[in-house]
C-alpha cells in the first residue's frame, strides 16, 4: 500500500488518536496529561506549504513526516527535488514518513534486534520519501533556538532519520534547541549518475545530496514557526551522515544554509569521481537491458526491478568502497566542484566551525557477523593486517603492540583497522580543515567502552549517537544503560548543544577544549573521565599517514 499523508479530522476519537500515536513511537503513557487520561495536546504549526498538526508530549512539540519536497516517483525519479504542492486544511504530522528504498528485493528481511542505530525499527520504505521530523520546546515564541539538523548514517546506501535512537525529544528538552531529522533519496535513486546519457539527468549523480540542501532550504524558510533560529543551524551526522556533512561543506548550493558542522565517525576525504559514477550507471543500464539512448525508461520501471539491478551491480563490486567508488555523490565540477577534503579541504564553507572525531574501535561493530575476528591468533592477525597494509602490515603490528602492551591479537587488529578506516582520515580532515585558517576546528576521540556483548565491542562505530542525543537509555542495547552512561551523556550532549549554539563545544562539565591546530593537535579524549591530550595517537598517526599516503 502506498503511503499517504493524512489529514486529521477534528472529530477523531481518543482511541484512534492513541492507536495512531503508537505508530509514531509514543507510548500511551506519554500521550496523556494529568490524571484525567485525556489525549496529549494537539498542536498546529504553519509552513510555507500549509499547516501541519503534531502532538505535544512531555513538554516537547513533535511533528513527523512533514513533506519538504514533492514526490520523487515516475517522471520525478532521478530529477532534482522540487517543492511539495501546497495543501489546504491541516495535514497530520503524527507518523514518520517512509524511509528511502534500500532493501534488496531478493534478500530476506534483516534480523530483528541488530546492534545498529540508523536502521533499527524503521517505518516502511517508500520512494516518495522527502520528509522531515521536528522536535521543539515551543512554537512561534521568537526565542530563536539553535537548530540541530541531523543527517542519518548508513553510508549513502541505507538508513533513515526516523530511527527511535535519534528521537529528538531529550535533546530538545535538555538544550532548549530545535531538532530536525530527515529522509532523502539513497543509493541508486539518489546517486545514479545518468548525465552522460541525457542532459535531463544532469543532476542525477548528486540528487540525494540536493535533497538535503532542499531540506535545509525548508528549514531556513520555516523553522522560525517552530521556535528555531534560521541563522543558527548545525548540521551533524554520524558515519554516512558524517560523510554527508563532509560533502555539504563542499557544495556551493549549501553555502549559508548552515553555520556549524559536526562530523561523527564519518570521513569522506573524497567521494565518487565522474568516471566511476558513469561506469556504475552503465552497469545498471546493462543489468536492466536498457540502451543508453532509452535511459528515460528508468522512470517507468517498477522500483523493485531497479533495486534488484542495483544490488546486482554492488554484488559484482564486492570489496569496493561504495562511499567512494559506488553509488555516491559525484564530483561534477558544478554541484560538487571538488573532492571534500582531497587534496585539500574545500574552501566553499570555510567560515563554518567544525567539530570532528571518531571512536577508538570503530570496526568492532562491523565484525559482529565475523566471530573469527574476536578470536584471532598471531597468524590470523598478520593475515588481516597484511590485507589492509601489504608490506607495511608487520611493522604496523609491531608498533601497535609496543604501544598497547597486553593487547590480544584481536585487540590489535581492531585498533589498526579502526585507525586505518577512521582514525587517520579523521585526523587528516581536521588538519586540512584547520589549514584553511577561517574557522575553528575541534577534534575528539571517543574511548568510552560499552559493557554490552560482554565488553568485546569496546568503543564501536555509532557509539557517539546515543550520547549526543541524550538517548542512552533508549539505546540501551548499545550502551548498556548503566549509571555511568547517563553521567557521560550529560557531558557529551551538553557539548554538542553548546557547539550548536555558539560554534564552541566548551562547557563547565568537560575540561577546557582548545581549538585544533596542526602544531598542537589538541584532542578531547571522551571517557568517564575526559581529558584533553595533544596528539594522543602521535606514533600511530604518523605511521598511518605514511601507509595511506596522506601527506
Image (spheres, rainbow, N blue to C red):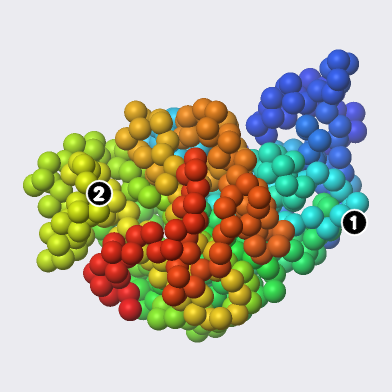
Viewer-proximal residue among 179 and 422: 422
- Kindly identify which residue carries mark 2: 404
Q: Is residue 64 left or right of residue 460?
A: right
Residue 336 percent coordinates (x, y):
52, 78
Residue 106 percent coordinates (x, y):
36, 43
- Quadrant the C terminus occupies: bottom left
Residue 111 percent coordinates (x, y):
40, 32
- Quadrant the N terminus occupies: top right
Viewer-proximal residue among 41 and 439: 439
- Residue 142: which disc? 1
- The reply to whether residue 414 is in sight is yes
Residue shown at the point (17%, 55%) measured from the top left: 397
Q: Report which quarter residue 473 is drawn in.
A: top right
Q: Is residue 80 left or right of residue 87?
A: left
Cα–Cα span, label 2 and label 1: 53 Å
Q: Is the residue 141 above or below the residue 201 in the image?
A: above
Q: Earlier in the sequence, mark 2 or mark 1?
A: 1
Q: Is residue 335 left or right of residue 421?
A: right
Viewer-proximal residue among 115 and 119: 115
Assess disc 1: are there few (<14), some (14-19) or many (≥20) residues with their C-alpha within 10 Å of its C-alpha: few
In terms of secondary structure, where does tag 1 sit?
loop
Q: Report which quarter residue 344 is drawn in.
A: bottom left
Residue shown at the point (22%, 43%) measured from the top left: 407
Residue shown at the point (56%, 68%) measured from the top left: 515
Amino acid at each position: 500500500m502506498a503511503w499517504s499523508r493524512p489529514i486529521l479530522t477534528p472529530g477523531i476519537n481518543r482511541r484512534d488518536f492513541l492507536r495512531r500515536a503508537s505508530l509514531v513511537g509514543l507510548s500511551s503513557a506519554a500521550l496523556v496529561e494529568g490524571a484525567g487520561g485525556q489525549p496529549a495536546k494537539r498542536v498546529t504549526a504553519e509552513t510555507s506549504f500549509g499547516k501541519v498538526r503534531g502532538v505535544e508530549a512531555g513538554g516537547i512539540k513533535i511533528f513527523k513526516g512533514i513533506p519538504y519536497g514533492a514526490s520523487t516517483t515516475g517522471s520525478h525519479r532521478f530529477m532534482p527535488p522540487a517543492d511539495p504542492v501546497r495543501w489546504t486544511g491541516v495535514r497530520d504530522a503524527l507518523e514518520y514518513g517512509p524511509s528511502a528504498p534500500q532493501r534488496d528485493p531478493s534478500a530476506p528481511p534483516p534480523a530483528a534486534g541488530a546492534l545498529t542505530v540508523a536502521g533499527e525499527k524503521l517505518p516502511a520504505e517508500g520512494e516518495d520519501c522527502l520528509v522531515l521530523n521536528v522536535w521543539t520546546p515551543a512554537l512561534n515564541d521568537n526565542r530563536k533556538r539553535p537548530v540541530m539538523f541531523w543527517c542519518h548514517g548508513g553510508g549513502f546506501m541505507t538508513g533513515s532519520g526516523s530511527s527511535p535512537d535519534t528521537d529528538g525529544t531529550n535533546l530538545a528538552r535538555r538544550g532548549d534547541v530545535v531538532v530536525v531529522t530527515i529522509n532523502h533519496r539513497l543509493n541508486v535513486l539518489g546517486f545514479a549518475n545518468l548525465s552522460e546519457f541525457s542532459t535531463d539527468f544532469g543532476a542525477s549523480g548528486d540528487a540525494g545530496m540536493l535533497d538535503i540542501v532542499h531540506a535545509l532550504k525548508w528549514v531556513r524558510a520555516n523553522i522560525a514557526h517552530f521556535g528555531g533560529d534560521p541563522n543558527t543551524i548545525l548540521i551533524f551526522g554520524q558515519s554516512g551522515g558524517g560523510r554527508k556533512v563532509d560533502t555539504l561543506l563542499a557544495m556551493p548550493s549549501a553555502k549559508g544554509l548552515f553555520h556549524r558542522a559536526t562530523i561523527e565517525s564519518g570521513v569522506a576525504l573524497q567521494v565518487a569521481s565522474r568516471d566511476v559514477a558513469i561506469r556504475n550507471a552503465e552497469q545498471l543500464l546493462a543489468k536492466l537491458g536498457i540502451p543508453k539512448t532509452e535511459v528515460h525508461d528508468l522512470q517507468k520501471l517498477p522500483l523493485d526491478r531497479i533495486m534488484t539491478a542495483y544490488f546486482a551491480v554492488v554484488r559484482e563490486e564486492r570489496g569496493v568502497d561504495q562511499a567512494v567508488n559506488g553509488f555516491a555523490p559525484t564530483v561534477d565540477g558544478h554541484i560538487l566542484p571538488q573532492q571534500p577534503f582531497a587534496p585539500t579541504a574545500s574552501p566553499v564553507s570555510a567560515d563554518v566551525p567544525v567539530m570532528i572525531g571518531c571512536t577508538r574501535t570503530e570496526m568492532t561493530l562491523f565484525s559482529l557477523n565475523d566471530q573469527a575476528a574476536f578470536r584471532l591468533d598471531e597468524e590470523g592477525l598478520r593475515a588481516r593486517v597484511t590485507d589492509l597494509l601489504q608490506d607495511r602490515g608487520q611493522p604496523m603490528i609491531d608498533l601497535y603492540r609496543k604501544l598497547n602492551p597486553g593487547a590480544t591479537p584481536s585487540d590489535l587488529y581492531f585498533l589498526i583497522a579502526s585507525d586505518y578506516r577512521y582514525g587517520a582520515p579523521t585526523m587528516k580532515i581536521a588538519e586540512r580543515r584547520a589549514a584553511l585558517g577561517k574557522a575553528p576546528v575541534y577534534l575528539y576521540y571517543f574511548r568510552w567502552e560499552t559493557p554490552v556483548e560482554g565488553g568485546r565491542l569496546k568503543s564501536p562505530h555509532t557509539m557517539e549517537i546515543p550520547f549526543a542525543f541524550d538517548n542512552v537509555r533508549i539505546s540501551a542495547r548499545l550502551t548498556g544503560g548503566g549509571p555511568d552512561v547517563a553521567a557521560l551523556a550529560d557531558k557529551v550532549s551538553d557539548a554538542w548543544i553548546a557547539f550548536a549554539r555558539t560554534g564552541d563545544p566548551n562547557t563547565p562539565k568537560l575540561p577546557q577544549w582548545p581549538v585544533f591546530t596542526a602544531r598542537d593537535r589538541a584532542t578531547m579524549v571522551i571517557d568517564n573521565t575526559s581529558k584533553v591530550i595533544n596528539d594522543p595517537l602521535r606514533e600511530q598517526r604518523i605511521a598511518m599517514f605514511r601507509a595511506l599516503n596522506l601527506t
